[in-house]
Amino acid sequence: MKLDGENKWQHWFDVKGIIFGYAVFNMVLLRTEVFLMGNIAALVDPWFRPWSYLNEPGRLLLAASLLLIGRRWSYYAAIGLTAYMVIRYVYLFALYGLTLSYEWSYLSKNEPYFVGSFDSQYFLALIILCSGTVYLVKDLMPSTRYRDFERVE
C-alpha cells in the first residue's frame, strides 16, 4: 500500500494518540509524585487535599480518552470538561490577583520542570480543548468532496 504525502504524515502524527499518551504519562507521573509525598496532592495551591481520580490528572485522562473515541458526543464531553478546567484556572488567577509573569517567575524558581507542575495540567487542558474544538468543527462541517459525492448519487 502506497501512501500519498498527506496520509503518510497523518499515519505518523496522530494528534489524538499523542494527546492520550501525554495524558497517561501525566497521570502516572503525578500519581507517583503524590505517592512519594504521602498521598497528599498539592495540585491547587494553597489547598492540599488527598489524592482522588477526580483531580486534574484524572479529568485530563478522561478528556483525552473521550477525544480518542472520536464521536460527536465525546468531542462535546471533552470540550466541556476541559473548558471547565480552563475557566476554573482563570477564576483562581482572578481570585488571588495573580499575573502570568508572577506565576512564571514562581515556577522558574521553585519548580525544576514544567511537566508535572500545576500549570502544565492547564496547558494540557488547553491543548485538549483546542483540538477537541477542531475535531468537532471537522465533524460538523463535512468537506465539499463528500457533499458533491452525495449529490451525484
Image (cartoon, grey):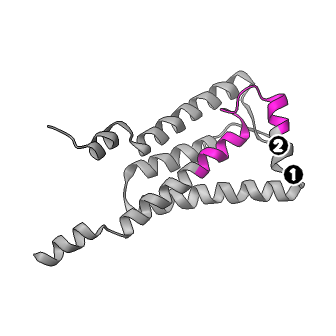
In this picture, residue 37 sits left or right of residue 12 = right
Locate the N terminus by quadrant.
top left
Location of residue 141 in the rendering, given as x and y in whole percent from the top left corner: 36, 70
Badge 2 crowding class, 10 Å Cα cut-off, few under 14, some 14 to 19, many 20 or more, is: few
Q: Residue furthest top?
A: 36
Residue depicted at 33% across the width and 43% down the height: 10
Residue at the spot of label 2: 103
Q: Nearer the viewer, residue 63 or 102?
A: 102
Location of residue 13 in the rendering, given as x and y in whole percent from the top left corner: 39, 39
Q: Amino acid at mark 1?
A: Leu
Q: Which residues are magenta?
A: 105-126
Q: Are marks 1 and 2 in contact (CB under 8 Å)?
A: yes
Sooner in the amino-acid sequence: mark 1 or mark 2: 1
Locate the C terminus by quadrant.
bottom left
Q: Secondary structure at mark 2?
A: helix
Location of residue 30 in the rendering, given as x and y in whole percent from the top left corner: 64, 31
Q: Nearer the viewer, residue 63 or 54?
A: 63
Main SS, magenta residues: helix
